[in-house]
Amino acid sequence: MEKTAKEIEKDVFRIMRNSELKGIIKGTFYRAGMRPKTAMTEDVVVKFLTGIDEQEQSGVVLVHLYVPNIPGSIDGELVEDIARVELLEKHLNTLVAQLEDSEYLFSKDGTPHSYPVEGIEQHFINMRLHFRRKTF
């Protein structure tokens, strides 16, 4: 039986929330659109991006890991916390191989990479998580 985008997003959210990432981040897990705009914590947001329905459903779910900026060394301007982002990118890079679920198979769809968040002093690490699930 095929699942909807929201059902897949909910499943991947549950899988990520129960992964080893839970003990690494300093914040909360959210589904798309649920993270407060004023949050200044290290949070994970899971968002369904695209999918194809056939005998095997497949597609991509985005995993965004937000990291607050830190004061720079010279003038105190907030800058990317490069050390923390590097550590978290490394964890995300290896996490995919450890994700286990009886319904889904996961693989990376690109290298985790950080981007600045518009309007707030944070960066987020974007990981594209490719999924496959049998529908028969």
Image (cartoon, rainbow, N blue to C red):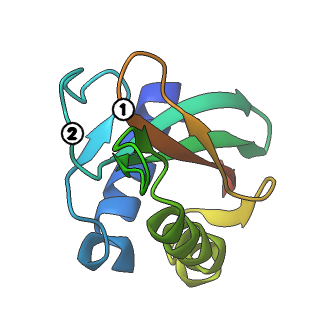
Between the C-alphas of marks 2 and 1, the distance is 8 Å
What residue is shown at x 49% (from left), y 49% (from top)?
80
Judged by depth in the image, the label closer to the viewer, 2 or 1, is 1
- In the picture shown, does residue 42 fall above or below 98? above
Task: Give the residue type at disc 2.
Answer: Met
75 or 62: nearer the eye?
75
Position of residue 95 measured from the top left corner of the image (x, y, whole percent): 55, 76
Amino acid, disc 1: Glu
The answer to whether residue 136 of the structure is visible from this angle is no
Q: Closer to the camera, 118 or 91? A: 118
Mark toward the start of the polypeptide (2 vs 1): 2
Do the residues bearing badges 2 and 1 touch, measured as CB atoms within 8 Å? yes
Residue 101 vs 66, above or below: the answer is below
Which mark identifies residue 40? 2
Using residue 15 as the reference point, say whether residue 37 is left or right of it. Answer: left
The residue under the point 69% across, 28% down is 50
Q: Categorize mark 1 by other alpha carbons within 10 Å: few (<14), some (14-19), many (20+).
A: some
Nearer-the-camera pick, 28 or 50: 28
Quadrant location of the N terminus in the rendered image: top right
